[in-house]
Amino acid sequence: MELTISLLFFAFAAAVCIQLFVRAHNLDKESEALSDAHIIVSHIAEVYRAGELETLIPELVGDDGIYKEGTYTLYYDENCNKADDISSEGYTVDLIFADGNLDIKAGELYSLSVYRYMPGKTVASMEGQVGS
């Protein structure tokens, strides 16, 4: 009887420990994904503020030299490198242009609004948001 109770106790303790390890692993993966999304979005924001976004999306600039309004999608692999198409481990980043401002969304992970100084327009600033 005592041996059975001891075995049940250790089985319960082992189950709790396994759940803790699984939860820690999941938190690590979520943290890594959020960190990668932040790196990608911040890089795009800095390229935009430097006025060189056409290096990422050549068809973005119109004949007048101004960024076209609309939504553009970029793909990144699991190592935060630009890719030609989506992979199962990669990230999809949407760039939404309106009135000279840019909203960058890395899926549901991270979003950032970037305002670039343009004469007679809004002052430059950056606002980030985790999740949606």
Image (cartoon, rainbow, N blue to C red):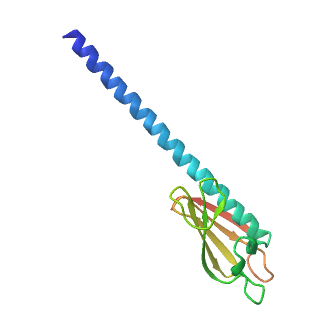
Q: Position of residue 123 (x, y in %)?
A: 76, 73
Q: Quadrant of residue 8?
A: top left
User: Residue at (53%, 55%) from the top-left corner?
Assistant: 89
User: Residue at (61%, 57%) from the top-left corner?
Assistant: 37
User: Residue at (22%, 10%) from the top-left corner?
Assistant: 2
Q: Nearer the viewer, residue 112 or 124?
A: 112
Q: Position of residue 46 (x, y in %)?
A: 75, 64
Q: Quadrant of residue 57?
A: bottom right
| Left or right, 18 with reference to 92 | left
Q: Nearer the viewer, residue 57 or 126?
A: 57
Query: Residue placed farthest to the top in the image?
Result: 2
| Left or right, 55 with reference to 109 | right
| Left or right, 123 with reference to 24 | right
User: Residue at (57%, 67%) from the top-left corner?
Assistant: 85
Q: Position of residue 38 (x, y in %)?
A: 64, 56
Q: Locate the N terminus by quadrant.
A: top left
Examine the rendered structure and indicate whether residue 73 appears above or below residue 82: below
* Numbered circles on residues, count: 0
